[in-house]
Amino acid sequence: MLGKLARYLRMCGYDAAYALDRGIEADDQLQNLAREEERLLITRKRSLAHRLEQSVLVESKEILEQLGELRESGFRIGLAEKSARCGNCNGRLQKLPAEFDRPAHAPAEGPVWQCDECDQLFWKGSHWETVRQRLSAV
Ligand SMILES: [Zn+2]
C-alpha cells in the first residue's frame, strides 16, 4: 500500500522495510513483524494503527502529502547523502572506490554507490535531483 513511501524513506536514510516485499499483508503478520524487528509501523489503516502503539497513521494517498504528514510527526525528510539506502531493496549503499570502472551511462564525475544486497548502482543524476527538489517542497 505504501511502497512508494518506503522508497522515499530509504532515500532519506531510513531503514524502511516494505511488508509486501516480504509477502506480508495480513494485519496480524504486520503487527508481529513490527514487534519482532522493533519497527515503527507506518500504515494507512486506522484500525491497524490503533492496535499498535509504535505506529504512525498516514491519511493521504498522495506521496508528497504522505511525506508531509511524516514530517509533521517528526521525521526528517530530505535526501541522506551519506546514509541513503537502496530504494529497491533497503540494502545499505557502499561508496565505490575511485578506480572503479564507471558504467557508460553514469556521469563522468562524482561518487557512485552500490547496494550491498542487490548490487544496483546509484549516483547523483537527474533522478536524484528530481527527488531532491520534490523533497524540498514537502
Ligand atoms: Zn538493493
Image (tube, rainbow, N blue to C red):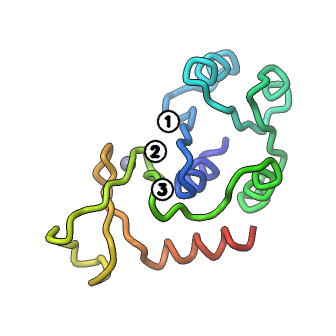
Marking on residue 21: 1
Q: x, y percentage for residue 17?
A: 54, 37
- The answer to whether the residues at label 1 and label 2 have Cβ atoms under 8 Å apart is yes
Left or right relative to 61: residue 136: left
Element class at badge 2: loop
Quarter holding residue 63: bottom right
The amino acid type, in three-letter code, at marker 2 is Asn
Q: x, y percentage for residue 2?
A: 66, 44
The amino acid type, in three-letter code, at marker 1 is Asp
* Alpha carbon separation for disc pair 1 and 2: 10 Å
Picture residue at 67% right of the left edge, 59% below the top: 77
The amino acid type, in three-letter code, at marker 3 is Ala
- From the image, state whether disc 3 or disc 2 is nearer to you: 3
User: Camera-side residue: 88 or 38?
Assistant: 38
Residue at label 2?
Answer: 90
* Alpha carbon separation for disc pair 1 and 3: 19 Å
Element class at badge 3: loop
Q: x, y percentage for residue 81?
A: 48, 65
Picture residue at 62% right of the left edge, 30% below the top: 39
Q: Which numbered disc flags the more N-terminal residue, 1 or 2?
A: 1
Q: Is residue 58 above or below residue 104?
A: above
Residue at label 3?
Answer: 84
* Alpha carbon separation for disc pair 3 and 2: 9 Å
